[in-house]
Amino acid sequence: MPEDTGSERYAQARFRRPPGSTELLIVRHGESEPADPARPFPLVDGQGDPALAPAGRAQAALVAERLAGEPIAAIYVTSLRRTHETAAPLAARLGLTPIVEADLREVHLGEFEGGAYRKHVAEGHPIIARMFEAQRWDVIPGAEPADVFATRVNGAVARIASRHPDQTVAVFVHGGTIGQILAAACGATHGFAFVGSDNGAISHLVVAGERWIIRRYNDTAHLTSAFTEAPQPLT
């Protein structure tokens, strides 16, 4: 038995969500259909808009199973359908209608939109090499400037948090968007440290005013090894 010293003792404190803060369960969309250079993805506001692949639909179902017991007050999606399709099973389970927050859409890839980005990554295009060296999407010709991307994504997170004090929300977004959110949370100058999120993975952020607290990154415990062992495209 521990010695009774007669003084008050203090257990190690567990994390508690700060009063008025918002918990964001940030889900990367499921795997989308393969890019075919002969048939570019349809565009929405200039951005590629592929549907989910069969594997992506299976990942969406596993996400719903994982999050169905969480006290989720709202579900947010972007203007791109792969997030809608990933959120759909959870929305059906919870009886919630997803809310579109367009500013959480993926970074615009300029001349590499419509599926061309994946081809250039696979082929080792020199611009892709420079992009990774500089750790900036806007190395791609015509791509969205880094400051514009950061401003719109960070603003969207702040707006969502302001609508849901003391609540938990699920946010279905994209790989580049997740990178930007978590970079902003930890004060990084860019989001490339966090763009390796798996399809269907869950990250977890608590927003307490100006304080953004990363609680979890790339949680894939609900996914099978078939979905997490293969390399994932970045967007």
Image: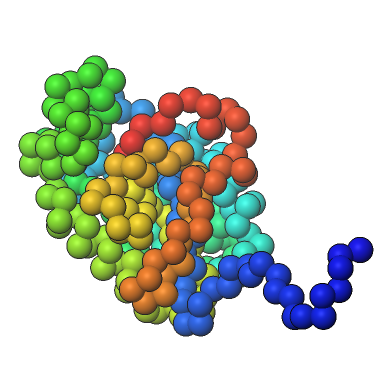
The residue most toward the top is: 123
Residue lying at the far front of the rendered structure: 5
**Going by the picture, which residue comes out furthest to the left?**
141
The residue lying toward the viewer, choosing from 143 and 50, is 143
Residue shown at 15% from the left, 56% from the top: 147
Name the image quarter holding residue 172.
bottom left
Tell whether 10 sits left or right of 200: right
Image height of 93 relative to 166, above or below: above
Residue 182 higher or lower than 15, as above or below: above
Q: Is residue 96 above or below residue 61?
A: below
- State the count of labels: 0
Name the one closer to the observer, 176 or 86: 176
Q: Is residue 235 visible?
A: yes
The residue lying at 23 percent from left, 51 percent from top is: 189
Please name whichever residue, 16 or 56, is drawn nearer the observer in this view of the structure: 16
The residue at the far right in this view is 1
Q: Position of residue 78 (x, y in %)?
A: 33, 57
Looking at the picture, how far across and down is residue 178, in whole percent? 36, 51
> In what quadrant of the picture does the N terminus appear?
bottom right
Q: Residue at x 71, y 70 (%)?
A: 11
Figure quadrant of the C terminus? top left
Colour pattern: rainbow
The spot of residue 58 in percent (x, y) is 56, 39
Position of 101 with respect to 128 (left or right) is: right
The residue depicted at 16 percent of the width and 50 percent of the height is 146
Q: Is residue 84 visible?
A: no
Residue in front for this viewpoint, 63 or 184: 184
| Residue 77: x %, y % from top left | 39, 59
